[in-house]
Amino acid sequence: MCGIIGYIGSQDAYPILIQGLRRLEYRGYDSAGVALARQDGSLAVYKARGKVDNLETVASARDTSGNAGIAHTRWATHGEPNDTNAHPHTSQSGRIAIVHNGTIENYAVLREALAQHGFTFKSETDTEVLAQLIEYVQNENHCDLVEAVREALLQVEGAYAIVVTEQGRPDRLIAARKSSPLVIGVGDDETFLASDATPIVGFTDQVVYLKDNELAIIERGKPLQIKSLDTDEPSDIDIQPLKMSVAQLEKGGYDAFMLKEIFEQPSTLLDCLRGRITDDCSRVVLSGVVENAERFLQAHRIVIVACGTSWHAALIGKRVIQELCKIPVEVEYASEFRYGNPMIGKNDIVIAISQSGETADTLAAIQLAREKGAWVYGICNVVGASIPRNTDSGTYIHVGPEIGVASTKAFTGQVTVLTLLALCAGQIRGTVSREKVREVAQALMKMPETIKEVLKLDGPIRQLSRMFTYAHNFLYLGRGYNYPTALEGALKLKEISYIHAEGYPAAEMKHGPIALIDREMPTVIIAPNDSLYDKIVSNVEQVKSRGGSVIAIVNPGNDKMERLADCCLEVPEVPECLTPIVSSIPLQLLAYYIAVNKGKDVDRPRNLAKSVTVE
Ligand code: F6R
């Protein structure tokens, strides 16, 4: 949510900043801006409402020279998306420019106090308040900007990652973070700062993940300095390798990142499984679980916290863990968990699931769980993100960067890891038979091939989508393992096509939603040959007898559904706990093609951002 980037070095900063903004655009695209600090001492600031393309149009007509600069792509929190509220924000004198990701909670109080000291404000943002506060502190204390930034941040409550530049100092950038991510790319005589590593890829493969409450001083010709915001003491600098390639960040011939990511699933699942199942499929070894075997042996309960698509994966995780480990599992929205007086005991395990590893609500839930003494396990995609840093142990899903705002490959990766976790912990607890481990492990190892089969539905789904593009409402139904799949299918459709869609447990339909069904409202039903198959057939009969049209996701040889449904999409049969993986992919494709038919910007749906770093 909001992307920031900074560059200082010997190259022209502007093209690097713009390219970086494009890679970060998935974090927000309400407005964009850039500030360039020039050798002649000037500071040029250009901003534009809307996507990075608009900023380019504005800036390309102006002087974009300079070897240092900062830039920002915004997801609006304080103030509507317009040019004035766009970052970078400057201080009263125009001397200091700042880009910020996060939320300053006490900005109203600070703004009021600064107004009393004669400061006036152009924008409605919390970030301008911070820029003014830094200038105020510097004026009052007659200190260097580094000290002013530190002093100002000590007065701030909330979350921030900031990069600051200053008129007359094209040789220095200052950055700091608290609860919002910031990565430093260390190159030869050049340094990059960014909300995540994507803008840095291709320039350097050495990165430092700034920690909470740290301040970095990047000065040309001098080694990187990092210090504690609280104590001003120098911190250790931990340079880590960056394992990401430029190809992973490009569309690779696909029309959209979302489509590329749907089609990547055979290989992402392979990466996710690599090294975690023995060659003979007799054992599953998830190091985070094996190393903490005692925790899983003693566990009385597991509580899973997550948001959005990750929450849907959690609901599937609940079923598979209960089936294979015989541990009771509760699933909570991370945003509700911390306001629901959670009762956590020392024998409870809290599992936090997050693609980005930066979701503010999930991070806050983790913090609360840890304060209550819980042991927290993270399931995350982005390596080095805040969630893996703030959990006691965990597993990466390793599906590579997910750039499309609608989550696809991360969902199947999360379900896969949850299944591995259930198998591994089930072995430790003695609650899963060898036959079951082998059956599920073999099916997982075959999953990349199985998904290739599912992806052959691309053409038929594209055609089918044309019949449903103009529906205003959709119902998605599933049972057991596939009730969460129904929720996920509905979420995919609504977030990228803006069609209202509801996911429901199929049998619940008759308790209310059935009233909605008419010829105008299609129903998507997930009906694999599982233990609930016959029951779901009767649910479909109820829809059909009310004139509704039905798209069914089925397994081969499904005569009953073939006769009832208007259209059947056949996916290979897999063990019941893996059906959400194969059933969710046709739903991803259906949502994608309906949104494309409607002319929507699939990768950048309105009002959304990939990484939700505000409450
Ligand atoms: C939906 C989607 C969101 C995220 C949610 C949590 O397609 O992407 O619902 O799943 O914002 O994000 P993470 O998993 O990064 O914590």
Image (cartoon, rainbow, N blue to C red):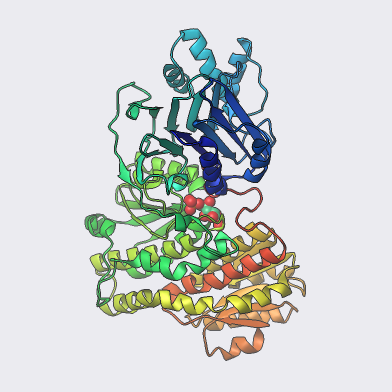
Name the spot of residue 56 as percent of width and height, x first. Answer: 64, 41
* Viewer-proximal residue among 42 and 393: 42
In the displayed structure image, the side of residue 260 where residue 305 appears, left or right: left
Q: Residue at x 24, y 60 (%)?
A: 290
* Residue at 27 percent of width and 32 percent of height: 236
The reply to whether residue 326 is visible in this rendering is no
Q: In x, y percent, where is residue 423?
A: 31, 68
Q: Residue at x 43, y 14 (%)?
A: 144
Does 166 appear above or below 246? Answer: above
Is residue 423 shown left or right of residue 21?
Answer: left
| Figure disc tally | 0
Report whether residue 140 is seen. yes
Residue 320 vs residue 204, the one in the foreground:
204
Name the image quarter holding residue 561: bottom right
| Front residue of 445 and 343 | 445
- Note whether 219 is above or below 1 in the view shown: above
* x and y percentages locating residue 136 in the rendered image: 54, 13
Camera-side residue of 382 and 554: 382
Up-down relation of residue 394 to residue 225 (above or below): below
Relative image position of residue 520 (x, y in whole percent)? 77, 71
In the displayed structure, 41 sits above or below 84; it is above
| Quadrant position of the C terminus in the picture | top right
Q: Quadrant of the N terminus?
A: top right
